[in-house]
Image (tube, helix red, strand yellow):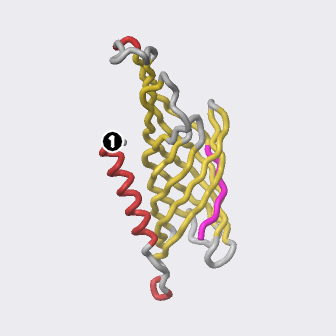
Amino acid sequence: MTVKRKTIVIAFLFMLIACSGFTQEKNQAHLSFRSIFQEGIVAGESGTDLQLQLVNGVTYKILFAGAGIGLDYYYERSVPLFLDLRGKVFNRPSAPFLFADGGDSFLWQKTKEDYQSSSSGGWFYELGIGYEVHINKKMKLLFSSGYSYKSLSTTINTMPWILPPPKEAIYKYDYSLRRISLKAGLSF
């Protein structure tokens, strides 16, 4: 993991910890801590796979901002770390909302092939629309759909037994995975 990626991971972890320090006080009802857990599917040219997300952040009136971590099994298993921004369209308990997520995606490979010299994740983002259903004072049910993007990079050495390999034996593949996302979740 490069220094840049380590810095990003540490920054996201501190943001998650900082967000968990906010508490709800009765005299400060406009600013409140909120957690969102979502699961769903992402579908694209390479099939359909599972996606899980956990987001912690703060709500102010109809706006939400938070930091999240996920597990994305599409094409290659990865762990996205991202910022999540949401806004309700109407100021009602049950209302539609718009969302935008963006950050970095880290590969979590099961096994590395002999010919694979390196693999890495890249950018991750999602844009979409959803609907928030008010269940009780603290819990809401969420449904959303949107466009999702994830990038990956793989370097393949076709002659792994030769060190260092000749330049013509190394191939780099960059993947831009575009897919549709359908999720359901809980907010509390």
Q: Position of residue 3 (x, y in %)?
A: 30, 45
Q: Which residues are magenta?
A: 181-188
Residue sitting at x 47%, y 66%: 57
Left or right of 169? Residue 183 is right
- Pick whichever, 118 or 132, lies toward us: 118
Instruction: Please tell me in which quadrant of the rendered image residue 184 appears.
Output: bottom right
Residue behind mark 1: 2
Q: The disc labelled 1 sits on which kind of residue? A: Thr
Q: Position of residue 97 (x, y in %)?
A: 57, 60
Q: Position of residue 48 (x, y in %)?
A: 67, 38
Name the outermost residue toward the bottom. 27
The total of numbered circles placed on residues is 1
- Pick whichever, 89 or 79, lies toward us: 79
Q: Position of residue 162 (x, y in %)?
A: 38, 14
Residue sitting at x 48%, y 45%: 125
Name the outermost residue toward the right. 135
Left or right of 125? Residue 4 is left
Badge 1: how crowded within 10 Å, few (<14), some, or many (20+)? Answer: few
- Looking at the rendered structure, the secondary structure element under dot 1 is loop
Residue sitting at x 61%, y 76%: 138
Instruction: Please tell me in which quadrant of the rendered image residue 111 appears.
Output: top right
Question: Height in image: 86 above or below 74?
Answer: below
Residue sitting at x 35%, y 17%: 163
The quadrant the N terminus occupies is top left
Question: Height in image: 66 above or below 109?
Answer: below
Confirm whether the magenta stretch covers residue 24.
Answer: no
The quadrant the C terminus occupies is bottom right
Query: Magenta: predominant secondary structure element?
Result: strand
